[in-house]
Image (tube, rainbow, N blue to C red):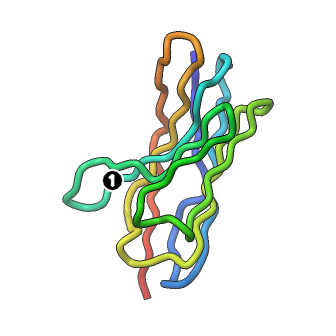
Amino acid sequence: QVQLVESGGGLAYPGGSLTLSCVNNGTRFRLNAMGWYRRAPGKGRSLVGVVEANGETDYADSVKGRFTVSGDGATHTATLQMNNLKPEDTAVYYCYQQTFYGRNTFWGQGTQVTVSS
């Protein structure tokens, strides 16, 4: 069974940086994509960024130029580097991994990121 474990959340000042990591500690399958969503207070879940197996990336407009998503297919680890954080980046961040065959999607437990002075 896939088991995604997230780490790296916490409190940051505006303009600061945080790095989130997500590793699969369970059964590993060939992957099609890895990425991150977030759920801000009072809002629905929205895409932050994704990296596909071919290396292509996509980001929400609100984080372009500030966040970088990367993935290591060998270790099944996804990373989200967040720079120049803003209060509106405050949210619970969820990582996901999508299998190549069947396009099954698995989720992490979520990690809280709070940006505040």
Q: Does 41 sit left or right of 64 as displayed?
A: left
Quadrant for the N terminus, please: top right
Which residue is disc 1 drawn over? 39
x and y percentages locating residue 46 in the rendered image: 34, 49
x and y percentages locating residue 117 in the rendered image: 43, 88
Q: Is residue 40 above or below residue 34?
A: below
Which residue lies most toward the bottom here?
Answer: 117
Amino acid on which the number 1 mark rests in the picture:
Arg
**Image point 51% across, 65% down: which residue?**
64
**Image point 65% across, 43% down: which residue?**
78
Which residue lies most toward the right here?
Answer: 74
Q: Quadrant of residue 18?
A: bottom right
x and y percentages locating residue 80 in the rendered image: 60, 55
Q: How many marks?
A: 1
Kind of element beneath mark 1: strand
x and y percentages locating residue 77 in the rendered image: 69, 39
**Image point 66% across, 16% down: which residue?**
29
Instruction: Give the camera-side residue of 42 and 64.
Output: 64
Q: Does 111 sit left or right of 44 as displayed?
A: right
Which residue lies most toward the top here?
Answer: 102
**Image point 58% across, 27% down: which residue?**
3
Q: Callout 1 environment at 10 Å: few (<14), some (14 to 19), or many (20+)?
A: some
